[in-house]
Image (spheres, helix red, strand yellow):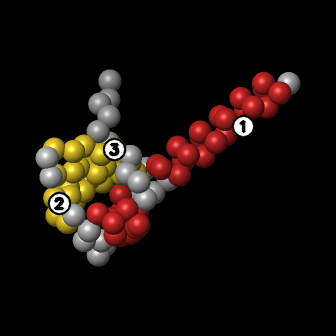
Amino acid sequence: MKRTRLGSAVAAMALLALTACGGQSKEDIVEKARGASTRDKLEKALGQPSDIVKVGPMERWTYKASNGEVVFVIIGDAVTLQHTGPSGEKKK
């Protein structure tokens, strides 16, 4: 019984985490990030991104949304560009 309850608890927490990440729309994310001109301000507004890609002084922060994703490009400490689009996942 303990194993079943533990498994259910873990599954519920995973579902909650997944919902929290994808529950916002692209528009919600962009609105929350409005005025966030530095890495710290962006992270304070949106939390940790779903994915970070680093290339030299440039970072690409991706936030998953319920209707796609929002990508921010950070150079040094400055948020320089944002892009919204469909999810990066390829459909089969």
Whether residue 89 is situated above or below residue 45 in the rendered picture: above
Counting from the top left corner in percent of width and height, residue 12 is at: 67, 40
User: Which corner quadrant of the image does residue 7 belong to?
Assistant: top right
Eyeballing the image, is 27 above or below 60?
Answer: below
- For label 3, the crowd category at 10 Å Cα-Cα, with few meaning under 14, some 14 to 19 and many 20 or more, is few
Name the residue that disc number 3 marks: 51
The residue drawn where x is 34% and y is 69% is 41
**Residue 48: x percent and y percent?**
41, 54
Q: Secondary structure at mark 2?
A: loop
Q: Which residue is mark 2?
A: 76
Whole-angstrom CA distance, mark 3 to mark 2, is 18 Å
Name the residue nearer the viewer: 34 or 90: 34
At 21% from the left edge and 64% from the top edge, which residue is drawn?
77
Gap in Å between the C-alphas at discs 1 and 2?
41 Å
Q: Amino acid at mark 2?
A: Gly
At which x and y percent is residue 21? 48, 50
> Which mark is first along the chain, 2 or 1?
1
* SS assignment at label 1: helix
- Residue contact between numbered discs 1 and 3, judged by CB atoms under 8 Å: no
